[in-house]
Amino acid sequence: MKSGKLKKFIQDFYLVFILIFLYAPIITMMVLSFNNSKSRTLWGGFTGKWYVEMFESAPIMDALYNTLVIALISALAATVIGTMAAIGINSMKKLPKSLAMGLNNIPMLNSEIVTGISLMLTFIAFGISLGFKTILLSHITFCIPYVILSVMPKVKQTNRYTYEAALDLGASPIQAFFKVVFPDILPGVLSGFLMAFTMSLDDFIITHFTKGAGINTLSTLIYSEVRKGINPSMYALSTVIFLTVLILLLITNFAPEKTEGTNTDSVRKKGLGGAGFKKGLLVLCSFAVVALVVFTAYRHSTSQSTNELYVYNWGEYIDEKVIELFEEETGIDVIYDMFETNEEMYPVIEAGGVQYDVVCPSDYMIQRMAENGLLQELNYDNIPNIANIDPKFLEMSQQFDPENQYAVPYCWGTVGILYNDKMVEQLGLPAPTKWADLWNPAYEGEILMQDSIRDAFMNALKILGYSMNSTNKEEIMEARDLLIQQKPLVQAYVVDQVRDKMIGGEAAIAVIYSGEMLYIQEEAARQNLDYNLNYVLPDEGSCMWIDSWVIPKNARNKENAEKWINFLCRPEIAKMNFEYITYATPNKAAMELLDEDVQNNKALFPDLNSLTYPKYKVFQYLGDDIDAFYNECWKEVKSR
């Protein structure tokens, strides 16, 4: 008896453990969707505002719509094509059939990234602009092999003589198929449809490579927000989707079953069950799908305006109200798309599959784009508001745009050290003042480094007294060895997580972008923390970065792009953007509109006279060979 109870206890414990392991992340996400703070580590009180924001957010609703429509249409198309293909393959002789099934299996065994890149290159080669239709075609192509694999076993089980008998009895080929063959293979068809729908719904990689401007699914939208931190409204959306699926599963599994005493004939007569109900439901679903397809086609055809502007920017790097104001004033329709990193943006512009009109890269990437002939010169006659930009930033921009031909500064900042004064004091250490402090063994397990190649190497190169734009491979290898030496002290290499970890007191010291400081200071004040988070620029000097607007060589709406840049250079518009994204503005006229305490915030707006050259420089493009060498050295650091 005791052994039986022990066995039962172990089984129950194992089940509970598995359930906790599976659902703890989902429960955490659901709790965060009601957190009044954007922090993932501190509770800021209960709120439902993220759910309101979710339904009011046009990008989220559009992404949800695109995700569901693409999944449904591609699954239906793939099911029809895949079912026909399975029937055709089954009628082949042995050798061709084996060859066809072998070819069908290759896309499933192949890496998705290969499929995605191949499809993208194919569309570009045939001059097809990337957008909704290319995502849809790609998803159909991607799903067909899975449908064939699901339908084929059922097709093999069908009896061809039954089909031939139906023909002999006077049925047409179509009638014979739907009356005899289709009912036998229906389970396989439904299985294939569900698999195709799920694969399309969950896909990211293929969508990422074949999507165009202004088109996002939920997966690509979430991915594009990672750099700035996922907005809690996405937690709200995920919670709604999870609860919807859970309710459907509960209804499906716990719906009352037909009892033996049920009068099925009367039910059929009333149209509430049996084949009549199923056929009615099928017809209703078919009409719904057709209506959805027609509406989608109409929506995308009517959305093509002749007065457009295709914008490519970082995630959460503009106030959406600014876009609305620009559209209202100019009558220009803005198609807005986002990227996560400069390295992600560059191949999109280089390939030319999507023709963006205006893009916001960083300093060194602008230099690379200009040197490779991907940019066109600005007509400053159309940008008179450039007079509001502080001349010092135009001068600094000459480090990557020598004659100020291509770029208008948008945001700027520095890279420095953020430290928790209480934790530093408890470690018995003075406040950090230099990059070398990040190599102090007393900070073991308390250091957060940026998961960025150039930023990490900048720290090490500055300590060694070398240029942060060094092209000397021996100097780069010395910096690599120094980073490897530091690695045992590092708690984690992070990007956006640095904010929450420092606010939550999870680390004592971190490398951070100055643009994060206003958010951190406001959140720390709201949480009433018993410690201060202070920002310092190291004695050795640091990187000063500038993000600027540029116009790609293949832009179709250059004048609209210049109107956009001019609009963003207005003082009141630049002020709106600053208050939303909290990254320092180079707009001198906008600075004068800010509160005095914000203007005097030295973490955000350090004295430009103190950022002397060459102690403070911007990153420069070093050439593909040197970039590749940095990448190899970084891999060695991360792999140790």
Image: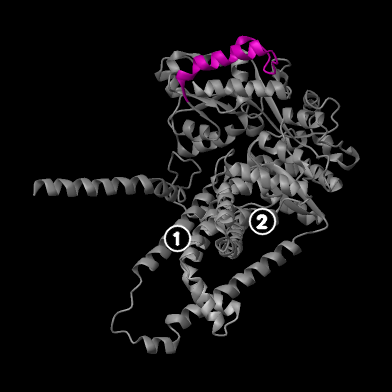
Q: Position of residue 180 (x, y in %)?
A: 50, 76
Q: Earlier in the sequence, mark 1 or mark 2?
A: 2
Q: How far apart are marks 1 and 2 (CA)?
A: 27 Å
Q: Which amino acid does label 1 sit on?
A: Val
Pointer 1 residue: 245
Q: What residue type is labelled 2?
A: Leu
Please name the predominant secondary structure of the magenta segment in the image.
Answer: helix
In which quadrant of the rendered view does residue 251 lie? bottom left
How would you rate the neighbour count of disc 2 (Cα within 10 Å): few for under 14, some for 14-19, many for 20 or more?
some
In the figure, 363 relative to 551: above or below? above
Q: Please indicate, yes or no, whether residue 319 appears anywhere in the rendered image.
A: no
Q: Which of 541 and 213 is in front in this view?
A: 213
Q: Position of residue 219 (x, y in %)?
A: 57, 49
Dot 1 falls on a residue whose secondary structure is: helix
In the figure, 332 relative to 513: above or below? below
- Span shown in magenta: 464-491
Q: Nearer the viewer, residue 71 or 127?
A: 127
Is 471 colored magenta in this rendering? yes
Q: Which residue lies furthest to the left in this view?
A: 1
Q: Where is residue 209 in the image (x, y as percent from the top left)?
A: 66, 45
Q: Which residue is drawn at 62% across and 47% down?
A: 206
Q: Nearer the viewer, residue 129 or 336?
A: 129
Pointer 2 residue: 137
Q: Position of residue 200 (x, y in %)?
A: 56, 55
Dot 2 falls on a residue whose secondary structure is: helix
In the figure, 213 relative to 551: above or below? below
Indicate which label's residue lies in the foreground, 1 or 2: 2
Please say which color scheme the image uses: one colour
In the figure, 137 relative to 179: above or below? above
